[in-house]
C-alpha cells in the first residue's frame, strides 16, 4: 500500500524547492510573465527597424518563456505529486491560463517575422553572430511561412490555446484522481488495492488468478466510462483535424510530421515494416503460450515472464548501483552526472495517493531535469529508472551546451537516449547472467521490450492514423467503433495464439498519449535508432560514444533526422527499423535455442 506523501522520506522526493521556495513564489513569476508579455507588445510593428530591434525582441521573448516554462514546470509537477490536492490543481490551472494569455500577447511575433523579406532575415543571421544563434529558429519560420496565419487570426488561436489540452486534462483527472478500482486478492490471499501504478506489477504475477482479477478490475472501470472517454478522445481528434485544416495542412498527420520536418513516409514505412515482420511476433506469442503451458492464452498472460525465475526485489539503492554498472560504456563523465541526480534529488521515487501514474522526465532550461516515478522494487522499475534518466541526461547535456533557443530537442529524438540506456542495461544483465535460465529470462524481457515498444507503439500509431482518417473523411466514430477497430488491430498484431477479448478491445480508452496526436510512433522509431546506437557503442565502433554524446549535446539545433546522423543513424531510410526488427528475430531464435536446453 502506498504511503501518504507526508510520510515519504525527503531523499525520495524531488526537490521542487530548488525551483521555488513555495507556490507563492511561482505565482509571482507567473504574474511577472504577464507583465513582461504586455510590455513585449511595444515591439509590434517595429521588427523591420533593423537587426538591433529584431535581436532585442528575440532576447526578450526568450526571457519571458524561460521564466514561464520554469513556473509551468513547478505548477504541473506540484500537481502531479498529489492531484487530489485542490491547491495544486488551482496553481496548475492558473499556469495554463497565463500561458494562454502570454501566447496571445506575443502572437504577433512569428507572423511579423514571417512577413520580413527572407533575404533580410538570412543576411542578419549571417552577419551578426548573436542573431546567428537564432538561425535554425529563423529557418523554421521561413519553412513554416505558408502555415502561419495573419496576426489577428494567430491572436484568436492563441486565445483558444487555454482550452487546447482540455480533453487530456479531463481524461487525466478522471482516470488518475477520480477512478477508484475494485480491490483484488493477492498471491497471499490478502485484499489489495488496485491502482494504475500497481496494475503492471499484478500483470507480472505468477498467480494467473491475480493477473485475471487485475485485468478485469481495471477494464471494468474503464468500460464503465468508455462513452465519456470516447467523447473526450474523439473531440481531441476533431481538434487535431480542425487545427490542421485551419493552418492549411493536407491532414492532421501532415501537420504533426511537419513540425519536425520529417516525411510522413517515415510514419507509413514504420507501419509497413512492422506489419511485414508480424509473423515473428506471432511466433513469439506462440512460444509464450507453449512455455506457460496454457491451453488458452489471454491478454493478461502477455506480461508475466515465460520462465519461472525466483522473484527478485530490487531496492531503490540497489537499482542505482545496477544502473551505474550498465552505463559504464558511456564513460565516467556520464556516470558522475547520474550520481549527481540522486544527490540533488532530481527524482520523485515512490507512489503516494493522488500521485500521477507512470513515469516521466520533466523540467525547464533553468531547472534540474526532474523525474517522476512510482518505484515498486521490481526489475521493471530499474528499467524505468534508467529509461527516464536517459531523457534527463539528454536534457542536461542539451541545456549545458545550447543556448535557450536551441536547447529544446524535438520529440522525434526524445526517445532515443532513454532507449539507448535500456539497451545497455539489457546487454549488461544478459552478459552477467549466471546460467541459461537467467539468460533466457532476461532475453525474454528484452523481447518484451521490443514487443511493448516497436510492435505495440506501432499498433497504437496505426490506430491513431485510422481514427484521424475516419474523422477527416466525415465519419463520426463512437466508443463502439473505436473498440471494434482496436479489436481488429490487436488480433492482427498478436495473432491467433492469444484471445482478443472485449476488455482488450477498449484498451484505447486508457492510453494518455493518444491526446498528443501522432506522438507514439516516435517510441518505435526511437527504439530503432537506439538499437543501432547501442550496438555501435557495445561493439566498440570508432568514435561511437563521442558521436553519441555529440548528439545528446545538440539539443534542437537542427532537424531531428539531421541530429540523429551525428550519432550515425539515418532515419530517412528504412534500414534502422528493419535492423531493429531483425534484431528481434535474432534474439527470438537465441531464446528458442536456450529454452530447448532447459527442457
Image (cartoon, rainbow, N blue to C red):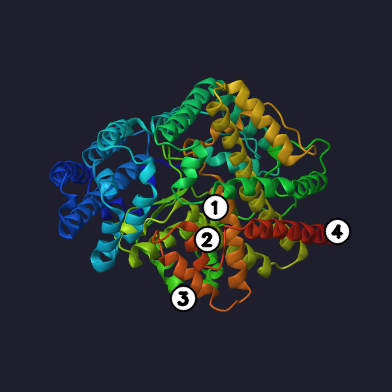
Q: Tell me if mark 2 has few (under 14), some (14-19) or many (20+) residues whose alpha carbon lies within 10 angstroms of its own.
A: some
Q: Tell me if mark 4 has few (under 14), some (14-19) or many (20+) residues whose alpha carbon lies within 10 angstroms of its own.
A: few
> Nearer the N terminus, badge 4 or badge 2?
2
Residue 507, quarter of the rendered image: top right
Foreground of the two, 54 or 396: 54
Q: Are marks 3 and 2 in contact (CB under 8 Å)?
A: no
Q: CA distance from mark 3 to mark 1?
A: 24 Å
User: Which residue in the structure is indicated by mark 1?
Assistant: 381
Q: Quadrant of the C terminus?
A: bottom right
User: Which residue in the structure is indicated by mark 4?
Assistant: 596
User: Which residue in the structure is indicated by mark 3?
Assistant: 332
> Nearer the N terminus, badge 1 or badge 2?
2
User: Which residue in the structure is indicated by mark 2?
Assistant: 319
Q: Residue at x 34, y 30 (%)?
A: 163
Q: Residue at x 49, y 30 (%)?
A: 237
> Nearer the N terminus, badge 3 or badge 1?
3
Marking on residue 373: none
> Nearer the N terminus, badge 3 or badge 4?
3
Q: Tell me if mark 3 has few (under 14), some (14-19) or many (20+) residues whose alpha carbon lies within 10 angstroms of its own.
A: few
Judge from the rendering whether residue 329 lies leftward or rightward of residue 114; answer left or right.
Answer: right
Q: Is residue 55 above or below residue 478?
A: below
Q: Tell me if mark 1 has few (under 14), some (14-19) or many (20+) residues whose alpha carbon lies within 10 angstroms of its own.
A: many
Q: Where is residue 6 shown, x and y percent of the image?
A: 35, 43
Q: Is residue 342 above or below residue 355?
A: below
> Nearer the N terminus, badge 1 or badge 4?
1
Q: CA distance from mark 4 to mark 2?
A: 31 Å
Q: Are marks 1 and 2 in contact (CB under 8 Å)?
A: yes
Q: Where is residue 495 shown, x and y percent of the image?
A: 77, 39
Amino acid at each position: 500500500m502506498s504511503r501518504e506523501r507526508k510520510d515519504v522520506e525527503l531523499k525520495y522526493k524531488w526537490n521542487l524547492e530548488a525551483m521555488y521556495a513555495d507556490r507563492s513564489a511561482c505565482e509571482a513569476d507567473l504574474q511577472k510573465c504577464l507583465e513582461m508579455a504586455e510590455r513585449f507588445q511595444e515591439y509590434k510593428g517595429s521588427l523591420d527597424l533593423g537587426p538591433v530591434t529584431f535581436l532585442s525582441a528575440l532576447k526578450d521573448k526568450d526571457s519571458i518563456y524561460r521564466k514561464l516554462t520554469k513556473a509551468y514546470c513547478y505548477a504541473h509537477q506540484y500537481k502531479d505529486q498529489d492531484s487530489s490536492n485542490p491547491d495544486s490543481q488551482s496553481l496548475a490551472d492558473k499556469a495554463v491560463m497565463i500561458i494562454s494569455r502570454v501566447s496571445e500577447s506575443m502572437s504577433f511575433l512569428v507572423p511579423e517575422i514571417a512577413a520580413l523579406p527572407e533575404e533580410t532575415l538570412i543576411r542578419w543571421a549571417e552577419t551578426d553572430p548573436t542573431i546567428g544563434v537564432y538561425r535554425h529558429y529563423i529557418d523554421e519560420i521561413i519553412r513554416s511561412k505558408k502555415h502561419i496565419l495573419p496576426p489577428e487570426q494567430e491572436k484568436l488561436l492563441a486565445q483558444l490555446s487555454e482550452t487546447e489540452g482540455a480533453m487530456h486534462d479531463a481524461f487525466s483527472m478522471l482516470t488518475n484522481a477520480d477512478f477508484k478500482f475494485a480491490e483484488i486478492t493477492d498471491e497471499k490471499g490478502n485484499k489489495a488495492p488496485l491502482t494504475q501504478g500497481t496494475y503492471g506489477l499484478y500483470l507480472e504475477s505468477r498467480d494467473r488468478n491475480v493477473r485475471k482479477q487485475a485485468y478485469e478490475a481495471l477494464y471494468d472501470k474503464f468500460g464503465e466510462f468508455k462513452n465519456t472517454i470516447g467523447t473526450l478522445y474523439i473531440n481531441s481528434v476533431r481538434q487535431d483535424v480542425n487545427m490542421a485544416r485551419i493552418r492549411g495542412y493536407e491532414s492532421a498527420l501532415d501537420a504533426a510530421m511537419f513540425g519536425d520536418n520529417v516525411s510522413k513516409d517515415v510514419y507509413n514505412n514504420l507501419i509497413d515494416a512492422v506489419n511485414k515482420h508480424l509473423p515473428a511476433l506471432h511466433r513469439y506469442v506462440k512460444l509464450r503460450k507453449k512455455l506457460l503451458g496454457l491451453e488458452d492464452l489471454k491478454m493478461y498472460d502477455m506480461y508475466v515472464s515465460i520462465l519461472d525465475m525466483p522473484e527478485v526485489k530490487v531496492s531503490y539503492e540497489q537499482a542505482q548501483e545496477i544502473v551505474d554498472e550498465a552505463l559504464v560504456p558511456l564513460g565516467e563523465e556520464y556516470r558522475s552526472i547520474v550520481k549527481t541526480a540522486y544527490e540533488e534529488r532530481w527524482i520523485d521515487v515512490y507512489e503516494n495517493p493522488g500521485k500521477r501514474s507512470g513515469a516521466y522526465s520533466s523540467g525547464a532550461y533553468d531547472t534540474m531535469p526532474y523525474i517522476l516515478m512510482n518505484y515498486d522494487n521490481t526489475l521493471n522499475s530499474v528499467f524505468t529508472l534508467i529509461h527516464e534518466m536517459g531523457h534527463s541526461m539528454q536534457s542536461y547535456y542539451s541545456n549545458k551546451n545550447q543556448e535557450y533557443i536551441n536547447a529544446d530537442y524535438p520529440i522525434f529524438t526524445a526517445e532515443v537516449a532513454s532507449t539507448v540506456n535500456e539497451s545497455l542495461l539489457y546487454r549488461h544483465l544478459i552478459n552477467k547472467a549466471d546460467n541459461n535460465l537467467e539468460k533466457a529470462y532476461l532475453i525474454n524481457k528484452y523481447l518484451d521490450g521490443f514487443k511493448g515498444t516497436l510492435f505495440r507503439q506501432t499498433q497504437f500509431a496505426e490506430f491513431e492514423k485510422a481514427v484521424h482518417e475516419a474523422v477527416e473523411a466525415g465519419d463520426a466514430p463512437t466508443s463502439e467503433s473505436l473498440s471494434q477497430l482496436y479489436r481488429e488491430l490487436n488480433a492482427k498484431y498478436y495473432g491467433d495464439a492469444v484471445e482478443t477479448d472485449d476488455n482488450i478491445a477498449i484498451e484505447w480508452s486508457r492510453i494518455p498519449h493518444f491526446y498528443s496526436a501522432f506522438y507514439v510512433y516516435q517510441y518505435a522509431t526511437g527504439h530503432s535508432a537506439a538499437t543501432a546506437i547501442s550496438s555501435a557503442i557495445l561493439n566498440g565502433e570508432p568514435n561511437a560514444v563521442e558521436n553519441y554524446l555529440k548528439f545528446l549535446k545538440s539539443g534542437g539545433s537542427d532537424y531531428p533526422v539531421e541530429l540523429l546522423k551525428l550519432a550515425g543513424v539515418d532515419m530517412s531510410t528504412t534500414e534502422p527499423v528493419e535492423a531493429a526488427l531483425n534484431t528481434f528475430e535474432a534474439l527470438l531464435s537465441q531464446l528458442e535455442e536456450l529454452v530447448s536446453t532447459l527442457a
